Image (tube, rainbow, N blue to C red):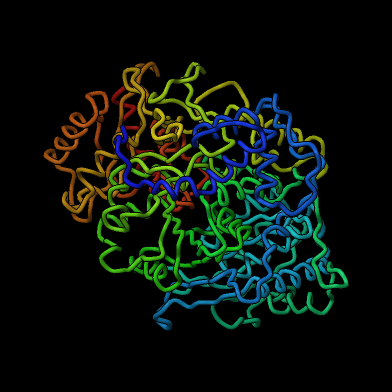
Amino acid sequence: MPDEYPLFQPQDHDATASAAFRFLRHVNAVYGLSLANYYDLYKWSTAHLDLFWGNVWDEASIIGDKGLHVVDNATLPSANPAWFTDARVNWAENMLHCRSTIKIALIEATEPTPDESTPRLRSVTYAQLYALVADVVSALIHHGVKAGDRVASYSSNCIENVAACLAASAIGGIWVSAAADFGSTGVMERLEQVQPKIIFSVDAVVYNHKIHQHLPKLRALLAGLTNKIPTPKVVIMSTISQPDTQSWESDWIGWESFVKEGQERKLGRSESGEIEWTRLPFDAPLWILFSSGTTGRPKPIVHRAGGMLLQAKKEFAICGDLRPDDVFFYYTTTGWMMWNFLVSGLSIGCTLILYDGSPLRDVGLLWKLVDDLGITIFGTSAKYLDHLSKNYRPRDHHRLETLRHIYSTGSPLAPPLFDYVYEHIKPNVLLGSITGGTDICSLFAGMCTALPVFRGEIQCRMLGMAVESFSPAGSLNPPDEAGELVCTRPFPCMPLGFWPLPGFASETDVRAAQERFYQSYFAEFEDHGDHIVITRSKMGNGGGLVMLGRSDGVLNPGGIRFGSSEIYEVLDTCFSSPAAGHAIVDYLAVGQKTDGGADERVVLFVKLAPGQELSSDLEAKMKAEIRTRRSPRHVPAKIIQVSDVPYTLNGKRVEVLVKKIINGAPLSSVNPATLSNPECLTFYHDIGEKLRAEYP
C-alpha cells in the first residue's frame, strides 16, 4: 500500500491559489455552498453533473453557443445520454483562439541523424498556424471534403499533421490517425472500416538515429485498400528533406502544392479572412480512435467534439492548472491517444513540443530539450521511466529549472519509480501518474495542482468522473479494497459509439456497430477493465488510485485475487535496479487455468539481461522476495525465462493475450498487425502446450 507521507505537497498558498480552488470558490459563491476541499468539490461534481459541466463550460470560456440544456442528471451511463443538445461548437475554433504573432504555438524537434548532430527544430507562431490551417481548410474544400467526411493521416508527429487535424475539424470532418511506425496491414484494417476521403502521409521518418523511407509502407497500404474503399486523395508531407516527386504516383500531391491551392482559392473563409468554422452539435463526431485489436479487427471508437473539448479544458485548465506560458511536451506517436491529448493543449494557448524519433537512443536528449526549450510539462510513459531508471539520472546532467509537472501513463507507475523521479529527476516536481484510455480519450484519474503526491498513487479521481471500485459480484468496495474500475455516472467524453454511426452506412452495418459497442461497454457486469484500489481519503484528496493491472489479467490462485503489478513491484525493487545489477530486464505474469478451470496457478515469464540464464539460485531468490514482500499466494508456481515480452504498437504489455494463448487460444486468433513484436508469440504458444500437459 502507498505511504502515508507525501513525496510532494503544494504550499498552502499554492493549493488555495490553484485553479481547482478557484473553481471551488466560484461554485460556493454561485450556489451558496461551503465546499472546503477537493473531495467536497469532487463529490458535488459527480452528484450534480448538469451544474458541474455547465459551469466548466463557463469557467473555461468555451467558444460557441451553449444553449440551456446540459444533461439529464438522473440518467445512467448505459443510456449514453445526449449532452448540451442546444449547443453549437467547433473544436478547432477553440484550439485556435490565440492569434498571437509572437507566441509560439508548435515547436517540432526531430531526432538527430548522422548528417545532423543536433535536433532539427521548426516552429510556428499561433498566427502562422492559424494562417496555415485556413489554407488547408480551403484546399480540403476544393477537394470535396465536407462535414462528416473522414480525413486520415499516416504520419509522424509534425507541424503539418497538427494543421491537417485542425483543418479537418474546422469544416466538421472526422479525423483518423495512424502512426508512421504502424505496419501497413494494421493501418489498412483501420482505414477500410472508416473509408477516408483523403490521406495525409509523410515520405520519411527519423528513428534510432536513422532516416526511414515511408512511401513503401504507404504504397502497401493503398494497394491493400484497392477495391475495398473508394480511392482516397493522397497528400505527401516532406518534413525531413526535399520531396523526391519523381518517385511519387502521378495522382499524389505534395503538401506545399496542396497549401498553395488553398491560398489561391480562399475557400471556407469570410470576407475578413476568418475561417468559416462549421459549428456542429456538441455530440458531433470529432475523431475516431481504434482499440489495440490484438484478437480481432480494431474497434473504431467515435468521440464527440464537445466532449473532447470540455474534458480537455477541465483536465488542463482546472485540474492540471496549465497556463498560456507553459511549454507542454508529451512523448507520443500520432497513433496513441496521448497525441490527441497533447494537441488539445492548444486550447490553453501554451506552446506544444512535437518530438519525432527514439526517446532512448540518446537517453539525455529529451532532458536536454527541457533545458533548451524551457519545457514545463513533461509527459511520458511508465515504461520510459522504467528504462531510464536503470542507467540514467537526469538531475546529474541537466538543470531542469523550468520543469514543474511530469506526467506518466500507458501502464501502472510502480512505487520505486516515484522514488526515482523525486531522487534523480527533480525533488519538487508534481508527478502526475494519470489513467484513462483510448475508450474515453481522456482521464478517469490523474493530476491536480491542489493536492499532494503519495508514493504509488495516482493523485485523485478527476472532477466529474464518478469512479468507484466494485467487487466481482458487482457491489461497491470500501476504501483500500481492490476491485474493478467502474464509472457510475455519465460523462461528456463517453464515446458516441463504434463506426459507422447512424446516417453513415446501411441499417445493417449501423446495428452491428451498435451491438458491438453495447457488448463492449454495457453488457452484464464482468471483469474487463482496470483493477484498482481507491485508498482512503488523505489531506482532502478523496482517495488516490493504485493501478493493479487489467481486470481480465488479474491473478486468482486459490481464490485470492491480486494484480500482476504487485509482483512486478517486487521485481523492480529487488532485481531490476542498478543495485541488483539489472538482472531482470522485463517480465510478464499470467494465470494458467487448473482443475478444469476451477483454479489457476501463476506463471511468471522473465526476460534477463544479455548473457544471463535463469539459475535455480535466482529463481529461489525471486520467490523468496515475493513471499516476504507480498504473501505465499503471490509466489509464482512457475518462472520461465523468455527472450522477449510482447507489446502493442503503443508500447503496452499484453498480459491478457498471453494468458489466452497459455490457456489454449490458437495463434490464429491473434492480430499480429497490432503488436510490435508478434514473432515472440510462437514461444508462448509452444510453452503453453507444455504447461497445459502438466494439468491435462
Quick check: 663 left or right of 253?
A: left
Residue 451 in percent (x, y) is at 43, 42
Quick check: 90 left or right of 10?
A: right
* Count of numbered circles on the image: 0
Residue 490 in percent (x, y) is at 64, 32
| As drawn, 103 above or below 488 | below
| As drawn, 321 above or below 595 | below
- For the C terminus, the quadrant is top left
From this viewpoint, is residue 97 visible?
A: yes
| Residue under the image location 37 percent in, 44 percent down | 413
- For the N terminus, the quadrant is top left
| As drawn, 153 above or below 558 | below
Residue 183 in percent (x, y) is at 54, 58
| Residue under the image location 30 percent in, 63 percent down | 394
From this viewpoint, is residue 297 visible?
A: no
In-front residue for pair 426/330: 426
Quick check: 236 left or right of 365?
A: right
| As drawn, 129 above or below 288 | below
Residue 332 in percent (x, y) is at 50, 58
In-front residue for pair 296/553: 553
In-front residue for pair 465/292: 465
